[in-house]
Amino acid sequence: MLTAIDLCYQIGSQPLIKQVNLDIQPNQLNIIIGANGAGKSTLLRLLTGFLTPTQGECIFLGKPLAKWDQNALAKKRTVMRQHCQINFAFTAKEVIAMGRAPHGKTYFHQALDTVIEQTHCQYLLHKDYRSLSGGEQQRVQLARVLAQLWQPQPSPRLLFLDEPTSALDLYHQQQMLRLLRDLTHQQSISICCILHDLNLAALYADRILLLSNGQLIAQGSPNQVLTQHSLMSWYQADLVVRSHPHYALPQVSLMR
Amino acid sequence: MTMRIAPCQQRYLIMGLLTILLITIFIAVNQGALPLSFKQLLALPFKDPMWQIWLHIRLPRVMLAVLVGMALATSGVVMQGVFRNPLADAGLLGISSGAALCVGLLIVLPITLPSFLLVYGQITAAFIGGIVICLIIYSLSHTSHGTALLLLAGIAINAITASMMGILSYISDDQQLRQLSLWSMGYLGKGQWDLVLIAASLIIPALWAALAISHRLNLLQLGDEDAHYLGVNVQRTKRQLIIITSLLIGTSVAVSGVISFIGLAVPHMLRLKIGTDHRWLVPATILAGGSLLLIADTLARTVAAPNEIPVGLFTSLIGGPYFLWLILRKRGKHLC
């Protein structure tokens, strides 16, 4: 679906991303993890086409990203960023409706109704976006990007998220990741998501990509990537990895 | 937020503003040093000097006030959208004074232009001055998003242009000095049909362009990166918007001098009523801006009739305290 070939990116003489090769399969929830400053957000911006790599390229649905028409691309690929500051009074509903901009008026109400229900934003709709809490803002942004991708029939689409759960409480973290998982499995939306919480990543990811110092160190299932040895060396933290009590999935605990 | 009208009522507000504008025009054309009512006019033959006054002095001036008001208010709403900042205003950021400085140079420096080119020369000068300051401010806003930086830059630019204007008035002769000072106060009395038509030929296309681009102005409020992901060509859109504002400000400054606060106050008041959806906000701003400057100009030429107060002084005199009151009332809350 999206293939990155030999991606390199540098500012001045400082390389931020080095020789990354990866392949995002359809209907998969991919989670990018890595320590602070590992280059996760930069990699995401290369994969989305916002930044142009100094070397290498990304192929999305058989066509290099740089060759896509921006509006056509916007219907098939979108990004939810960590933080979105709006300085004027927009209601949450107006913000969500902006997601339909690339589509004009087609399926406007249908799309909006669906995503508002999916993200539980009903009671936020007429509030000023700026007055919402961080978590509520994140849910509104999720609704906006889902509205942007919404189509009546399943078709290949790609959703990027940069730390979508950073301001969410436990209940909404669970809701969001369940929703993301459903989206990949039922509506053929592929997802590539940056997460800091390794336990959440382990629970929901189909595939985990571990990034360190601009390089892709490991990729594979949670059990393959989240091993005690590799996490201790790449994160340089004292931790133990055990199995989840209910699933055969790894869970990480910090040592005191 | 309680003042805000329901989303479905926005079209009624637009129609209401249009009605207000038409009524204001209807009243304004009959006011002035020489009161002329339609009843009187209709009783007179068309060759009567009263008709000539109405047709060649009153009407073009009213039209010029409406056009300039529309241009100033729209430049405000567009600039606030581009900078994502409710305080962006041609006056505060020094764009008007940059435009004014260039026109001042044209008035004072010994450049002789044929008279039919003079107005276009002034407009071109004002446009160049406006766009240069716009680009300086824009490049500053790119490096940091602070309101403080933007306003400090505006203060600095205003100080520089004010001192250069001072130099210009110092070296100018008596006639130039009078022209310069009257013009820098904001004055619509030059309104002849040729001037109105020239202004209209630039302002109306720019307003139309602002309306056409208003949807993308909404998306820009998410920030450059998010707008990009929605398929907006951010750099091109911003370039178009800056050209639109520079054209609107340049033309207004060239034909009427510096008239402040319309660009700041009109979008601000309307946002409280209809929110920030630019698809409604831009047309509402166009209509309300036209009405407001026309009301101000009509008052400016009737309050002390037969003398006139320059309308620029008038708008600052009313607009300044209003804005202060608005800030004090909203202290600690969102400004818009």
Image (cartoon, grey):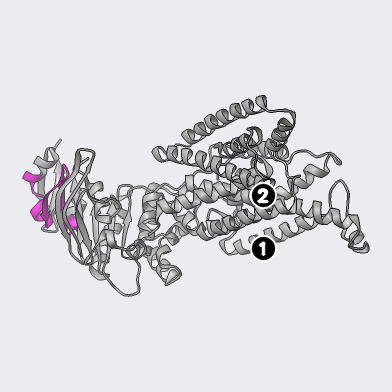
Crowd tier of the residue under label 1, counting other residues whose Cα lies within 10 Å: few below 14, some 14–19, many 20 or above: few
Circle number at residue A235 = none
Residue A206 on the magenta span: yes
Crowd tier of the residue under label 2, counting other residues whose Cα lies within 10 Å: few below 14, some 14–19, many 20 or above: many
Name the residue tied to disc 2: B69
Which quadrant would the C terminus of chain B be assigned to in this image? top right
Q: What is the magenta range? A: A203-230
The x, y position of residue B243, in whole percent, is 51, 49
Q: Chain of mark 1?
A: B
> Helix, strand or loop at disc 2?
helix
Q: Residue at x 15, y 35 (%)?
A: A256
Is residue A106 left or right of B247 when viewed as pictured?
Answer: left
Cβ–Cβ below 8 Å for labels 2 and 1?
no
* Three-letter amino acid code of the residue under disc 2: Gly
On the same chain, marks 2 and 1? The answer is yes
The x, y position of residue B291, in whole percent, is 70, 52
Q: Using the image as rendered, state which of residue B326 and residue B114 is in the foreground.
A: B114
Check the image and report above or below for A96 versus A199. below
The x, y position of residue B165, in whole percent, is 62, 29
* Three-letter amino acid code of the residue under disc 1: Met
Disc with the residue nearer the chain's start (2 vs 1): 1
